[in-house]
């Protein structure tokens, strides 16, 4: 499973969306209508899954932003 | 009664916080609660630095006891307020509307105790990891900006998930509520609406009377569709707002600005102008319980403490006796 697929799966689980609705260019707030509680939950889930630390204001707006950020963290480990 | 850890940490006598209500929780109310042995909190809301600075100065003149400042993280003046509380060496701050992580180092360097208000387990866990000293867990029974979960469900889940002290908020109005919150694992409680109707609170009398007249079912939640839910007493504005929400929510391209226009200045109209119809009279669901006007903050705190003790001595155990 790629980083994108794992993150996609976490988002699908949290927000009850279809996989097709969660693509690289998908925006958390505008497309997925995620509220702040959902976003904090997804961030925690990703930290647990990948054993990385996500800061709360990294300016991540799309799924691809998040994937890039997590991959950068993984590469620095 | 033995002092809880949070009382020791903050140097307060009773584990009672006064909720930070924008426009309502200014220096007079906050200092009265602190003088009475609880933790008064000045709400900075969207106010500029100069206004909050004056409130802090006034509170310092009115009490030598610890008081807090609440920082609304979505305020356009947030950076200024963060600097201000550090300059003024405020003992404790609470934060609302998100995560204060980016300011945490600054607060810690200034020796400030940081207590974020959270509405989910995930945010509570993040706050603990980021160095928060405690968290206020606020259920959706509360007034003003709220989350999705109830106090009854959220408090024990957060208590299980973090090791820092938990302060329960939302739906607490008397000693029974305090006892219940403590049994759920909280170390302290925070009340907003109860202090709004206190004698020392400077909110407009019309607003206070509306809270006193309210029944259990008299609050509405607006803003659910836009992701910023707010609980307040039902009036002409909440009805108009909810109708507009339904109409815009049904459109392919909603005009959410329409809702923003309705909400602009609405809280000030309640608190300052005493307008009870075209205003946002933020209030918790517990308002229906309150009938006694002009109680001092000291009387309220004493009643909460006595009521809590009575509950622990009596009703909790009576069903278990054989």
Image (tube, helix red, strand yellow):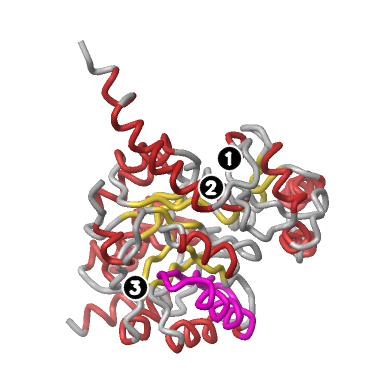
Residue at 61%, 40% (x, y): give it.
B287
Q: Is residue A64 left or right of residue B207?
A: left
Distance between the alpha carbons at the discs numbered 2 and 1: 6 Å
Residue linked to disc 2: B142
Asked if the residue at tag 1 contacts the one at tag 2, i.e. Cβ–Cβ closer than 8 Å, the answer is yes
Quick check: can you spot residue B224? no
Image: B167 above or below B76: above
Q: Earlier in the sequence, mark 2 or mark 1?
A: 2
Q: Do the residues indicated by labels 3 and 1 lie within the same chain of the protein? A: yes
- Report the number of numbered marks: 3
Image: B305 above or below B103: above
Please state the extent of the stretch shown in magenta in the rendering: B50-76
Residue linked to disc 3: B113
Instruction: Report the front residue among B15 and B222.
Output: B15
Q: Earlier in the sequence, mark 2 or mark 3?
A: 3
Q: Is residue B19 left or right of residue B234?
A: left
Image: B162 above or below B31: above
| B62 falls in the magenta region | yes
Image x and y of residue A58, in percent: 41, 79
Quick check: can you spot residue B122? yes
Image: B52 above or below A22: below
Q: Chain of mark 3?
A: B
Residue linked to disc 1: B285
């Amino acid at each position: 499973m790629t980083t994108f697929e794992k993150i996609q799966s976490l988002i699908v689980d949290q927000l009850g969306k279809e996989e097709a609705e969660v693509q690289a260019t998908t925006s958390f707030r505008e497309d997925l209508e995620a509220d702040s509680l959902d976003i904090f939950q997804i961030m925690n889930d990703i930290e647990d899954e990948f054993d990385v630390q996500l800061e709360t204001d990294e300016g991540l707006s799309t799924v691809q932003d998040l994937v890039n950020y997590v991959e950068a963290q993984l590469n620095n480990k | 009664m033995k002092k809880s850890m949070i009382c020791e940490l903050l140097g307060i006598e009773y584990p009672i916080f006064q909720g930070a209500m924008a426009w309502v929780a200014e220096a007079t109310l906050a200092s009265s609660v602190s003088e009475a042995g609880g933790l008064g909190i000045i709400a900075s809301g969207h106010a500029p630095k100069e206004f909050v600075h004056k409130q802090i100065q006034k509170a310092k003149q009115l009490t030598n006891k610890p008081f807090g400042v609440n920082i609304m993280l979505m305020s356009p003046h947030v950076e200024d307020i963060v600097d201000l509380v550090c300059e003024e060496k405020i003992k404790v701050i609470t934060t609302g509307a998100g995560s204060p992580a980016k300011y945490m180092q600054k607060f810690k360097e200034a020796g400030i105790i940081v207590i974020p208000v959270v509405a989910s387990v995930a945010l509570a866990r993040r706050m603990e990891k980021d160095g928060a000293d405690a968290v206020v867990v606020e259920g959706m029974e509360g007034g003003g900006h709220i989350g999705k979960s109830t106090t009854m469900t959220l408090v024990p889940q957060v208590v299980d998930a973090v090791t820092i002290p938990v302060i329960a908020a939302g739906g607490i109005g008397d000693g029974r509520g305090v006892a219940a919150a403590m049994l759920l694992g909280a170390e302290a409680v925070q009340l907003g609406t109860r202090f709004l109707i206190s004698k020392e609170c400077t909110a407009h009398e019309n607003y206070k009377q509306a809270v006193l007249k309210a029944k259990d079912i008299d609050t509405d939640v607006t803003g659910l569709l836009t992701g910023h839910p707010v609980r307040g007493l039902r009036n002409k504005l909440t009805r108009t707002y909810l109708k507009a929400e339904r109409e815009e929510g049904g459109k392919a391209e909603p005009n959410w600005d329409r809702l923003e226009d309705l909400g602009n200045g609405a809280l000030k109209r309640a608190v300052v102008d005493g307008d009870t119809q075209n205003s946002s009279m933020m209030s918790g669901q517990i308002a229906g319980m309150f009938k006694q006007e002009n109680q001092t903050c000291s009387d309220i705190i004493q009643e909460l403490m006595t009521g809590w003790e009575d509950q622990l001595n009596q009703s909790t155990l009576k069903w278990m006796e054989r």
